Amino acid sequence: MIKNIQVNHSCLPNCEQRLTKNGGCSLIALRDIHVGEELCFSYVSILGTNDERREALSYNYRFRCCCPRCMGDDCTAFDAEHTCFCGGISLEVDRRKGECVCNPFSIVL
């Protein structure tokens, strides 16, 4: 079991970060990840414009994002499947419920 890893940011991530009941954290793959491929999750909500996300990343993390979403790629299919109502990323989003699925344990950060 891996105890500690570093994961980079992408506004079009290949995994999601999920908090566990005991206060831990796990990564869930959103798609098949190739051997040697960098693990990425979104540090910020993907709702809003490219400029808003870039400003948040610049202010909070001191870098400019150049992921496919920020470079203008069409992310409609990804968003429909993986964007939670709160703007977070989730493996599965139940569109019928209309409520957040990213934080099932109601953990306040």
Image: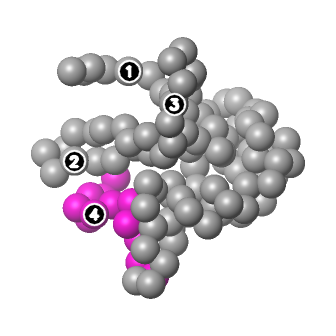
- What number is the disc on residue 34? none
Mark in the foreground, 2 or 3: 3
Would you say the residues marked 2 and 4 are in contact, meaning their CB atoms lie under 8 Å apart? no
- What number is the disc on residue 33? 3
Mark before the other along the chain sequence, 1 or 2? 1
- What number is the disc on residue 5? 1
Q: Mark 1: give few (<14), some (14-19) or many (20+) Cα within 10 Å.
A: few
Q: Choose between 37 and 50: the one closer to the eye.
A: 37
Mark before the other along the chain sequence, 1 or 3? 1
Q: Is residue 48 above or below residue 31?
A: below
**Image quadrant where residue 92 sits:** bottom left
Mark in the foreground, 3 or 4: 3
Q: Position of residue 44 (x, y in %)?
A: 57, 49
> Residue at label 2?
20
Stretch of the chain drawn in magenta = 98-109
Would you say the residues marked 1 and 2 are in contact, meaning their CB atoms lie under 8 Å apart? no
Total numbered badges shown on the rendered structure:
4
Q: Is residue 37 above or below residue 95?
A: above
Task: Report, in whole angstroms, how far the alpha carbon at label 1 lies from the one at label 3.
Answer: 16 Å
Residue type highlighted by circle 4: Pro
The rendered magenta stretch, by its main secondary structure, is classed as loop
Residue 53 makes an appearance in the image: yes
Q: Secondary structure at mark 3?
A: loop
